[in-house]
Amino acid sequence: MDTVPAVRHEARTGTRPEFDAVVIGAGVAGLYQLYRLREIGLRVRAFETGSAVGGTWYWNRYPGARFDSESWTYGYSFSKELLEEWEWEEHFSAQPHTERYLNYVADKFDLRCDIQFNSRVAAAHWRDHDLDAMIAALKQMEAEVAGGGLGIEGDAAFHHAIALAARNEILLHMIDAMADVIQESRIESLSEPGRPPRSLAAHRKILAAIEVRNAELAGEAMRQHLRVVADVSLLRWQPETSEDADVRQ
């Protein structure tokens, strides 16, 4: 089954397919990667130049083409059922039988629905969606400050984007809770002259470090920024003394 029509439909309707991973080639290794990536819940598409699965066992059809290793070594081990139900015809499998095996695997695990045949990959470019989110949040904060605001919404969005990048559910909850508390406690202190620009400058440093993939620099920039946050909000809270506790009793 060729998935090219579906891709053309996406192009006509203006929708852009989103994938967590892309596999190039639908040969022995490509089918394995596609199966494993789908197994862990990722959205995957494989791109194959040919019109069917098989890779080298699809293209190479010369007389005598066969394995140079024992047939069983080419069998996929991720499925006990597959291992038990497939019988290799020869000790060193010939091309036609190997191609049938790979088609059998593609059909058994419904892999074709995520393969785009008759397609060549001309180029690939990395797009960091996490970085995009941080840039958007920084621009939001800059716009808020430029309009005379305090930049609180953009500030919270920036830290939320960092938490999302870490893919950490606990951290996300912490960031949300901290944003709620800090939003109130920072109103007065953010109104002080120079406070929003200093916070913006800290965000720019963090983003610059992330853009060049410098973890140490990003960590230090974040530490400096959080010290400012602590001065503004966390250190405003003072633990009760023993005398306070005695009075309350």
Image (cartoon, rainbow, N blue to C red):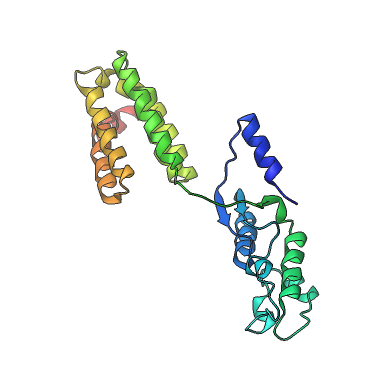
Who's the residue at 24% across and 45% down the image? Answer: 220
Q: Is residue 225 left or right of residue 69?
A: left
Q: Position of residue 196 (x, y in %)?
A: 26, 23
Which of the 4 quarters of the picture holds residue 58?
bottom right
Q: Is residue 242 left or right of residue 103?
A: left
Which of the 4 quarters of the picture holds residue 141?
top left
Who's the residue at 77% across and 65% down the image? Answer: 104
Q: Position of residue 74 (x, y in %)?
A: 65, 76
Count how many numbered circles sit on residues in the image. 0
Which of the 4 quarters of the picture holds residue 190?
top left
Who's the residue at 69% across and 72% down the image? Answer: 61
Q: Position of residue 3 (x, y in %)?
A: 70, 47
- Asked if residue 69 shows in the view, the reply is yes
Specify the quadrant that holds the C terminus.
top left
Relative depth, front residue between 78 and 74: 74
Residue placed furthest toward the front: 62
The image shows residue 140, relative to residue 74, as above or below, that is: above
Relative depth, front residue between 229 and 107: 107
